[in-house]
Image: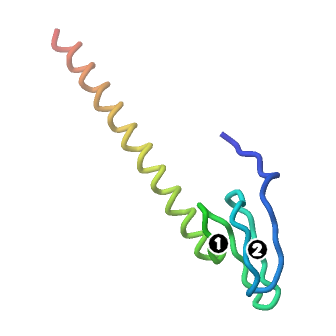
Amino acid sequence: MAKLLSSIKRFIGESGELKATDCPNGSTFLETDTGNMYVFVEGKWLLKEEANIALRLETIRRLTALLEEAKKTNETLELIAESVSNE
């Protein structure tokens, strides 16, 4: 299901400033003195490169779970088909 992205917050400031912790995932903070971009993911500010990796790992985890569920469904259908063909 698609998510509304208008609630994402975008911040800009210096590296020594405290970053907000009440942000939705995907919010960003650009450090003007370092040029580093941080992305808020699951309650943490991560460097953009680290955030990309974290989001990819989460996607892989979700896909793996979906594949496991599909495998179970397929095995169930195979058992039903065998049962019907044996009668």
Dot 1: element: strand
Give x and y (percent) for residue 52: 60, 69
Camera-side residue of 61 and 29: 29
As drawn, the residue found furthest toward the left would be 86
Is 40 on the left or on the right of 70, as rendered?
Answer: right
Q: Residue at x 51, y 58 (%)?
A: 58
Position above or below: 70 against 28: above
The amino acid type, in three-letter code, at marker 1 is Trp
Residue under pointer 1: 45
Is 36 on the left or on the right of 52, as rendered?
Answer: right
Q: Residue at x 27, y 26 (%)?
A: 78
Position above or below: 72 against 7: above
Position above or below: 16 against 39: below
Residue under pointer 2: 29
The amino acid type, in three-letter code, at marker 2 is Phe
* Residue 58: assigned label: none
> Are circles 1 and 2 on residues that touch, CB within 8 Å?
yes
Dot 2: element: strand
Q: Residue at x 38, y 38 (%)?
A: 69
Camera-side residue of 23 and 82: 23
As drawn, the residue found furthest toward the bottom would be 33
To which quarter of the image does residue 19 belong?
Answer: bottom right
Mark before the other along the chain sequence, 1 or 2: 2
Mark 2 crowdedness (10 Å alpha carbons): few <14, some 14-19, many ≥20: many
Give x and y (percent) for residue 64: 42, 50
Camera-side residue of 24 and 47: 24
The Cα–Cα distance between marks 1 and 2, rounded to whole angstroms, is: 8 Å
Give x and y (percent) for residue 37: 73, 78
**Which quarter of the image is occupied by the C terminus?**
top left
